[in-house]
Amino acid sequence: MAKNEIPQIYKDFVGTKKIFSGGIFSGRRAEPEEEYDVLDIRVSEAIIMDMSKSHPRPKHPAFELKIKKIGMAKARWTRPFPIREIKLNPNSKY
């Protein structure tokens, strides 16, 4: 699997309703559990925090979802979700 390829399992989220909660838009504010319409998906990058390792932390392939719920004025992109199926190297647990 290429680093810039999103697996089909995540692409299938587009056009469905999913339940999200927590810091989906920002780490500072937790959203309550609610149902959102998933409108689009895009490739992104995320830094996986591993407290046992020192800097630098490699960027990991990820995806972001454009979601909207009733009451939102505009759809928003989520924070990156890491694509765990993509292995950075054979010795990595991510």
Image: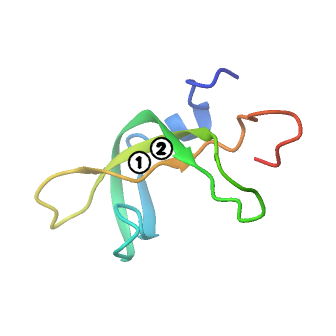
Q: Secondary structure beneath disc 2?
A: loop
Q: Residue at x 71, y 59 (%)?
A: 50
Amino acid at pointer 2: Phe
Toward the viewer: 28 or 13? 28
Residue 87 position, x and y percent, is: 76, 35
Identify residue type, mark 1.
Answer: Thr
Furthest residue toward left: 73
- Separation of residues labelled 2 and 1 (CA atoms): 6 Å
Which residue is outermost to the right?
Answer: 91
Q: Which residue is mark 2?
A: 13
Relative to 21, is 15 above or below? above
Q: Residue at x 40, y 37 (%)?
A: 41
Which is more toward the observer, 49 or 5?
A: 49
Q: Quadrant of the N terminus?
A: top right
* Disc 1 crowd, CA 10 A, few/some/many (<14, 14-19, 20+): few
Asked if residue 85 is positioned above or below residue 71 in the image, the reply reads above
**The disc label shown at residue 63, or none:** none
Residue 19 lies, in percent from the top left, at: 45, 65
Point 25% across, 51% down: residue = 76
Report x, y in % for residue 78: 37, 53
